Amino acid sequence: MRTGEEFLASLTDGRYVQYKGEQVRDIAAHPALSVCVNHALSAYGPTPRGLSDADWIVQQQGGPCSVFYAVPRVPADLLRRAAAIEALTAQQWGQFNIIKVVGSDVLFALVSLRDRLAADGTAPGAAEAVDGLLHRCQISDIATAAAVTDAKGNRSLRPGQQRGGAAYLRIVDRDAKGIVVRGVKLHTTSAPVADELVVLPTRAMAAGEEDFAVSFAVPTNAPGLRMLCRPVREELDPFDNPVSARAFEIETTTIFDNVFVPWERVFLAGACDLAGELARRFATFHRFTGLSYKPPLAELLLAATRWIVADNGLANKSELAHKLAEIINYITVIKSTRTASAVTGRLIDGGVFCPDPVATNAGKFYFASRFHDIAGLCQELAGGLMVTAPSVADLRSADAAWLSAAFDGACHDSHRRLIAMNILRDLTAGELGGYNYVAALHGEGSLGAQLTAALHEYDFAEGERRLDDLVEAVRLDKRLAHPVY
Ligand SMILES: Cc1cc2nc3c(=O)[nH]c(=O)nc-3n(C[C@H](O)[C@H](O)[C@H](O)COP(=O)(O)OP(=O)(O)OC[C@H]3O[C@@H](n4cnc5c(N)ncnc54)[C@H](O)[C@@H]3O)c2cc1C
């Protein structure tokens, strides 16, 4: 298997990363961005606590393979994968590590559609491209990121109607060797630390939109590919920012400036009917991933809040305990929908076992729409100190003794109490906290996308049949014709 050292060595392969307007040649050495490198590194590290080695590196016919890249064939494979995502996220203080995981969400969708992509013929190397990606993931253990979301411009217009020409990624040239693509994808999590970007259409495409129906895998050092990082808070002290000083993910605005992609890496190049199917299958796997990484964040919030309530001497107050119970319910419902979607999933093409899309979207919608409420409960129970506490520098100042005396609680000393408060601020009220709110709402697609998926996937037939039976049974004309009294 690939080692952490090999992963780190790959980062200086000439890929173009930009931060605050300047090129970053060695992201691992960058004072702010090195945090997300170390976070990503955890996917190449030792088995996270609570997981067996056999469930971290899985033995397959072709040899050992990261659990994330093992194609699910039965419900237990989905549950094993969920447990691994959960354990790694818990180890990283509730912050998801998307490296490998999102790439595998795309990979499973591609493997399931491989034969249809090949039969379509508009991407002549489609089968080879899917097999190649599978091999690089399973055997070379590459780091992957997914570039799906287009800039989209005016949402009420179709891709070809947008002004400017960059709102949707599109094919601008094609020849016997491959395609040239141009456009901008947004929000590409962990792109600067990925070896390859796996690119998908963000939506279904209609006839006439063939140039936008494009999907491929490209090395991040491909000429013309530029990754512009979002700004982050810099030089954080871990006492004041216990999580964000040590783990966060970086997103990029990802520019494809006439990037050449050879046919052996192109999955889709003009098949409009398959673009939507590919995007939908990816979304189901990706939202199942969401159900796997969300509980550890809520568990950390619950633990810190309960700890503070006890330190405030209020552990036996039932009105506070009931609010903690609401957080327990939140975690339990997410985990339950995850299990339900794995157990009631189904085998789709290519022998891939897919989570049940209705249960998956219901769970994703639930956690996304309730996350702000749960964070609000934590804030309500913790009190205002979580946003007004003095900094670590003050604890080292001449007033340190005053602060110790003031902040000693029922169970813990002042430093431990302040760290618990800082964890809650960091996760719900600081910059990372704001990010967590928006990530819950929009990561894996907006709330509207989950509702649209529910309408698309739900089987209305049985309920409608029963309704028809009832309507037929009580119809007045029938009852008059065949009175039962
Ligand atoms: C932290 C984070 C990480 C992310 N990581 C990735 C990643 O790794 N790769 C990736 O590709 N993407 C990623 N995303 C993107 C994410 O999938 C999108 O943010 C999400 O799909 C919503 O798209 P949008 O941001 O363009 O918002 P919009 O689609 O503009 O949505 C805004 C609102 O408008 C509504 N809306 C949009 N269009 C219509 C319409 N036609 N009719 C009616 N209502 C409409 C939506 O329902 C929503 O309420 C990430 C996002 C976040 C926040």
Image: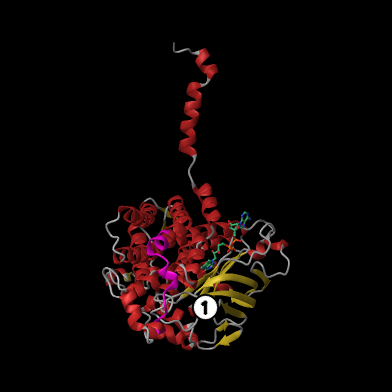
Question: Picture coordinates of residue 231 (x, y %)?
Answer: 55, 78
Image vertical order of residue 165 relative to residue 282, above or below: below
Closest to the observer: 277 or 378? Answer: 378
Image vertical order of residue 139 relative to residue 379, above or below: below
What residue sits right under mark 1 in the picture?
232
Majority secondary structure of the magenta segment?
helix
Question: Picture coordinates of residue 469 (x, y %)?
Answer: 47, 28
CB of residue at label 1: within 8 Å of ligand 1?
A: no
Which element carries disc 1, helix, strand or loop? loop
The residue positioned 48% from the left and 79% from the top of the image is 193
The residue positioned 42% from the left and 67% from the top of the image is 384
Question: Picture coordinates of residue 19 (x, y %)?
Answer: 57, 82
Q: Tag 1: Cα neighbours inside 10 Å, few (<14), some, or many (≥20)?
A: some
Question: Picture coordinates of residue 473 (x, y %)?
Answer: 47, 22
Q: Residue furthest top?
A: 485
Quarter containing the C terminus:
top left
Q: Is residue 100 visible?
A: no
Task: Give left or right: position of 263 versus 398.
Answer: right
Q: Which corner quadrant of the figure contains ligand 1?
A: bottom right
Task: Give left or right: position of 462 versus 396.
Answer: right
Tag 1: amino acid: Val
Q: Does the magenta stretch include residue 388?
A: yes
What span is in magenta?
A: 377-393
Closest to the observer: 341 or 372? Answer: 372
- Number of marks in picture: 1
What is the image's colouring? secondary structure
Image vertical order of residue 125 relative to residue 16, above or below: above
Q: Is residue 225 visible?
A: yes
Quarter containing the N terminus:
bottom left
Q: Is residue 186 magenta?
A: no
The residue positioned 41% from the left and 74% from the top of the image is 389
